[in-house]
Image (cartoon, rainbow, N blue to C red):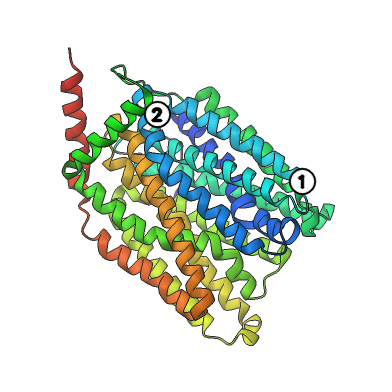
Amino acid sequence: MKLSRLNPFKGLPNAKEVWAWGMYDLANQSFTLLIITLLFPIYFKNVIAPANGDALWATAGSGSLALVVLLSPFVGAAADSYGIKKRLLIITGVICCVLTCLMALLGANDTALAIGLFVAANVSYQLGENILAGFLPEVSTPRNIGRVSATGWAMGYIGALLLILLTLVGMLVIGWKDESQWAPYFLLAGVWFALGMIAPWKILKEVRPTTKAQGTLVANTIGRLTETVRQASRYRHLSRFLLAFFIYGLGVQTIIYFAGIIARDFGLQDAQLMVFTLQLTVMAGAAAIVTGIYQERVGAKATLIFYLLLWIVTALGLLALTLIPAGQRTDNQWAFWVVGNGVGLGLGGIGTASRSMVGRFAPRHKTAEFFGLWGMTYKSAGVVGVLSFGVVKSWLGDPASMVLLGSFFVIGLVLLLRVNETSGVRAARRAERDAARTQAP
């Protein structure tokens, strides 16, 4: 492979804009990694609410995702109707940054305030993530949409990699190792996010609607959503894909929320846990980059099939490891590190391929609306998947939970086989032509 091919921006007509778009992915990784996945959940449980932290954290996470599910289609449709995607992207990002920085002031017994800050910050972050995805068809073409999607995904993992290294420096060099000393990392997360938003704020462009929206914001938004539902048969392959995406998204979201817990079950602690996360991040970033290079050749559907098969094999590997008695798992950590490579590759590849598929199926005049539906689907998967996995893990044990995890990917694969990528793309192009004829003077 020529080294020049590893430059994701080489040959793009709008390389600067694609870079600015990807910078938002790099920036918001600070919230994903430090607040959602690794540090803040442990800080909340052990420092803020040690008595019943698990239940309260689960409630805060599920409740915030449920709010996002309700708001996503309205925010997406409004962004398209009024041409305010960029404005909403920056506003939601700024809100998340400010609230994340305020988390650094939280201490023992600040339970209600902590829940309020996290819920508001997570809703802002998740909505912004949906809006960012709505820019994908605008910063790409039908020929390079997979490559551009993978570029943004890879930049996100580069951000995660840098943040992990900074966190390790804080733990091993400065000495911020104990949970009670983690407040500076939350400030880091907010400042990192804010600095990363400067490029998209300055450079990112937005395609304005050709016709002015009529009526109030609420009425116009509901009208657009009603139209989308009425024309569901026109986008039937998008509907089929979203169903498949919801099912295998149950598994992806479960891994995101439980990776740290599963790693701790195998004896990984503190810096060792961060190194394991570093491994996952490197593998995920590599998968995103390779996917960007080859996805256009084989298609988004074929790429997704490959990664779903990889996820199934990984789930089977985790199942085999959970059959090892708990007292002997520490002696078999090497096997967990090996299986962890499958988790990293699966996270990096399936995310960019899924986002690319939605971009292919979305008419350009409905990008934010359709990506709002995509985000709503993914967040719904988070609510259902994480809860069901946690219940099964608690009541029936680790092996049963891994069987459930694997079933998410198996069923998702079966449903994906019903999706016709070519027909879905043709439907989107027809919708664009119809919209152009309607708006022509």
Q: Which residue is mark 2?
A: 79
User: Residue at 76% of width from left, 52% of height from top?
Assistant: 182
* In the image: residue 297, left or right of residue 268: left
Residue 4 visible from this viewpoint? no
Q: Point out which mark residue 184 bears.
A: 1
Q: Nearer the viewer, residue 155 or 428?
A: 428
* Image coordinates for residue 115, horizontal then vertical, percent: 63, 49
User: Residue at 27% of width from left, 30% of height from top?
Assistant: 223
The extreme front residue here reads 112
* Image coordinates for residue 35, horizontal then vertical, percent: 63, 50
User: Residue at 80% of width from left, 53% of height from top?
Assistant: 181
Q: Residues within 10 Å of mark 1 (few under 14, many from 20)?
A: some
Q: Is the C terminus in the top left, top right, bottom left or bottom right quadrant?
A: top left
* Image coordinates for residue 40, horizontal then vertical, percent: 67, 53
Q: Residues within 10 Å of mark 2 (few under 14, many from 20)?
A: many
Please say if 40 is above or below 229: below
* Image coordinates for residue 352, horizontal then vertical, percent: 41, 49
* In the image: residue 175, left or right of residue 152: right
Task: Name the image quarter holding residue 249.
Answer: bottom left
